[in-house]
Image (cartoon, rainbow, N blue to C red):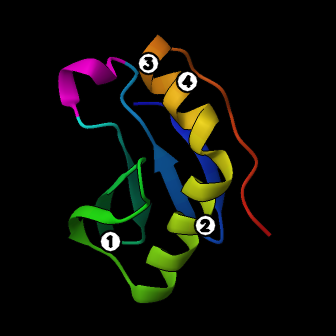
C-alpha cells in the first residue's frame, strides 16, 4: 500500500487494486491511530482518529478528490502534496 501523502504527521495511503475494496477510500494513520475515509465525501468509514485529524483528512480528500478517484479507478500511483 503506497504512501500518497504525508502532512502534519498524517500519512495517507491507498491500495492500488481498489476495485476489489469498494467503496473508494483512503487509509490515514496518525501515531497509533488509524482510520479509513470515503473518497466520495471525506467522512470516516472505519477506525479511530482524532477530531483535528479528521478535519485535515477531509480537507485533503476535498482538495484531491479527482486525483484520488483517478488513482483508485486506474490503479496508478501519484504522490500528492499535503495541505497547508
User: Which residue is labeled 2 in the image?
Assistant: 59
| Label 1 to label 4: alpha-carbon separation | 29 Å
Q: Which residues are magenta?
A: 17-22
Marks 1 and 4 in Cβ contact (< 8 Å): no
Q: Rounded to the nearest whole Å, what is the CA distance between mark 2 and mark 4?
A: 18 Å
Q: Residue furthest bottom?
A: 51
The structure residue drawn at horizontal position 22% and vertical position 32%, both measured from the top left corner, is 22
The percent position of residue 74, horizontal first and vertical second, equals: 48, 12
Q: What crowding class fits label 3: few (fewer than 14 Cα within 10 Å), some (14-19), or many (20 or more)?
A: some
Mark 2, secondary structure of its residue:
helix
> Are discs 3 and 4 less than 8 Å apart at CB?
yes
Mark yes or no: residue 29 visible: yes
Left or right, 36 with reference to 64? left
What percent of the width, then of the height, locates residue 41? 42, 58
Kindly identify which residue carries mark 1. 32
Q: Residue at x 63, y 33 (%)?
A: 67
Amino acid at each position: 500500500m503506497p504512501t500518497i501523502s504525508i502532512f502534519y504527521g498524517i500519512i495517507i495511503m491507498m491500495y492500488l487494486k481498489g476495485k476489489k475494496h469498494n467503496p473508494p477510500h483512503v487509509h490515514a494513520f496518525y501515531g497509533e491511530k488509524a482510520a479509513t475515509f470515503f473518497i466520495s465525501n471525506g467522512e470516516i468509514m472505519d477506525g479511530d482518529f482524532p477530531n483535528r485529524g479528521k478535519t485535515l483528512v477531509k480537507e485533503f480528500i476535498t482538495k484531491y478528490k479527482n486525483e484520488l478517484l483517478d488513482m483508485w479507478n486506474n490503479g496508478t500511483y501519484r504522490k500528492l502534496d499535503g495541505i497547508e
